Image: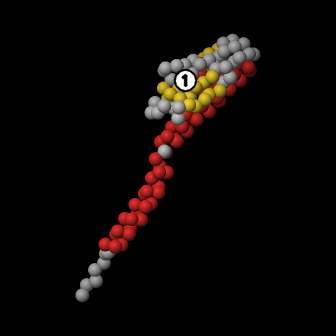
Amino acid sequence: MKKQAGFTLVELVVVIAVLGILAATALPRFVNVQASAQKAAANGLAGSIVSASNLARASWIAGGSVGTQITMDTVPVEVGAAGWPTAAGIKAALQDTAGFNDNATPGTFVRTDSTCTVTYNPNDGKATVGGC
């Protein structure tokens, strides 16, 4: 007589039930991953904006604190009276704004796949994240 090898119906049902429980507990952890990633991208751009504005102001101060234009990596950047890049000048100071649309309002960057926005303040060189 041959012995049959395989799983019983009870074993299969138990395994399916365990997998269902694991999926039900793990799924909520991954639901908000996209929103978290979009907010992280907006925070990353805000950090880049602050760094670029600080570098531009430092260059303006090192150049004698005169003029309304500096050069960063051979790119002219428009600055205000206090040395911070203007709302239009911050785009030139940044090297990359991939994933963000900056055509609507100078100094405001909108994430193309969400409502996250990053707004640059040319009065103090700060950036704020909103709408995420």
Q: How many marks?
A: 1
Q: Residue at x 65, y 27 (%)?
A: 126
Q: In this view, does 128 lie above or below 62?
A: below
The colour scheme used here is secondary structure
Quadrant of the image containing the N terminus: bottom left
Q: Is residue 67 above or below residue 30?
A: above
> Residue 119: percent from the left, percent from the top?
58, 26
User: Toward which corner of the image does residue 39 lie, by quadrant?
Assistant: top right
State left or right for residue 17 relative to residue 40.
Answer: left
Q: Residue at x 66, y 15 (%)?
A: 80
> Dot 1 surroundings within 10 Å: few (below 14), some, or many (20 or more)?
many
**Whether residue 61 can be seen here:** yes
Q: Is residue 36 above or below residue 26?
A: above
Q: Which of 15 and 77 is in front in this view?
A: 15
User: Toward which corner of the image does residue 128 lie, by quadrant?
Assistant: top right
Q: Nearer the viewer, residue 35 or 48?
A: 35
Q: Give the residue number, with chain letter if any, for mark 1.
A: 108
> Residue 30: percent from the left, percent from the top?
47, 49
**Whether residue 96 can be seen here:** no
Kind of element beneath mark 1: strand
User: Toward which corner of the image does residue 2 lie, by quadrant?
Assistant: bottom left
Q: Which residue is drawn at 49% across and 51% down?
A: 29
> Residue 86: percent from the left, percent from the top?
62, 17
Return the residue found at the far bottom.
1
Q: Which residue is drawn at 65% across and 16% down?
A: 79
Return the residue found at the far top.
67
Q: Which of 29 and 69 is in front in this view?
A: 29
Name the amino acid type tagged 1.
Thr
